Amino acid sequence: MHDHQLAFLKLALGRNALRFGQFTLKSGRISPYFFNAGSFDDGASLAVLGQCYAATIVASGLPFDMLFGPAYKGIPLVAATAAALYTHHGRNVPFAFNRKEAKTHGEGGAIVGRALAGRVLIIDDVITAGTAIRESIELIRAAGAIPCGVALALDRQERGRDPVTGNTLTESAVQEVARLYGIPCLSILTLGALIEAVRGGAAAQPGEHLAAMEAYRAQYGIE
């Protein structure tokens, strides 16, 4: 596990953004862990989180020209990542985010920040149903720019669920985005890496959590 992944894991555990136990998800599944990026709610945690995103992006080698954060959680994430890219990697890149409702006065429009142009990297916390990412891609393309990838905090590596039939799908939301739009999805941490961290003691969690996570991955995890 890389240093920025360990830093992210320590931060997520310390701020209670990552918890272990039994949690009922929107899908109805009972998950042995829960992640909530909304718990990164102060300057110190946001600074570290931005560094983790920036390190992940730089390590990937993915070429991009600017960043975009989907409202609402993506707004502080994209700003923190842009700041970290400049402070820690010497790269000054523009960023933008969207409003949920287009502004009809003043400068108007749905986009705040730099006008979307070139290769745009989307910054978000997780992909659950993929709705926010699809909307972001449509916004970027409508502006004449190119969505070039998505950077996430956590990839659950979990197969989705058909909203109509309720059946378990064969691919995750991350895989679906990559297949439909042909863009890569980067992540600071994956479920697989998290399980290895728990197994190796880096997450300092009791053994029953490891067994529950492995069972959950066996039932719902992607191939």
Image (tube, rainbow, N blue to C red):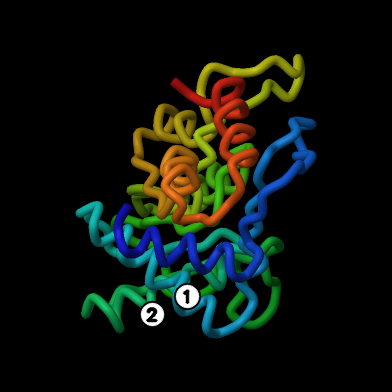
Residues packed near mark 2 inside 10 Å, few (<14), some (14 to 19) or many (20 plus): many
From this viewpoint, is residue 163 visible? yes
Residue at 63% in and 37% down: 129
The correct choice, above or below, for 192 with respect to 85 in the image is above
Query: Horizontally, is 155 left or right of 30 in the view?
Result: left
Secondary structure under tag 1 reads: helix
| Viewer-proximal residue among 61 and 102 | 61
Count numbered badges in the picture.
2
The correct choice, above or below, for 140 with respect to 31 in the image is below
| Viewer-proximal residue among 140 and 87 | 87
Residue 82 position in % (x across, y down): 38, 74
**Res 40 → quadrant:** bottom right
**Res 70 → quadrant:** bottom right
Circles 1 and 2, Cβ within 8 Å, touching? The answer is yes
Residue at 45% in and 56% down: 202
Amino acid type at image mark 2: Ala
Residue 94 position in % (x across, y down): 36, 74
Residue at 60% in and 68% down: 109
**Residue designated by label 1:** 79
The correct choice, above or below, for 68 with respect to 151 in the image is below
| Viewer-proximal residue among 132 and 103 | 132
The correct choice, above or below, for 195 with respect to 172 in the image is below
**Residue 38: assigned label:** none
Residue 45 position in % (x across, y down): 54, 77
Amino acid type at image mark 1: Ala
From this viewpoint, which residue is outermost toward the front?
207
Residue 103 position in % (x across, y down): 68, 71
Residues packed near mark 1 inside 10 Å, few (<14), some (14 to 19) or many (20 plus): many
Secondary structure under tag 2 reads: helix
Residue at 41% in and 54% down: 188
**Residue designated by label 2:** 83
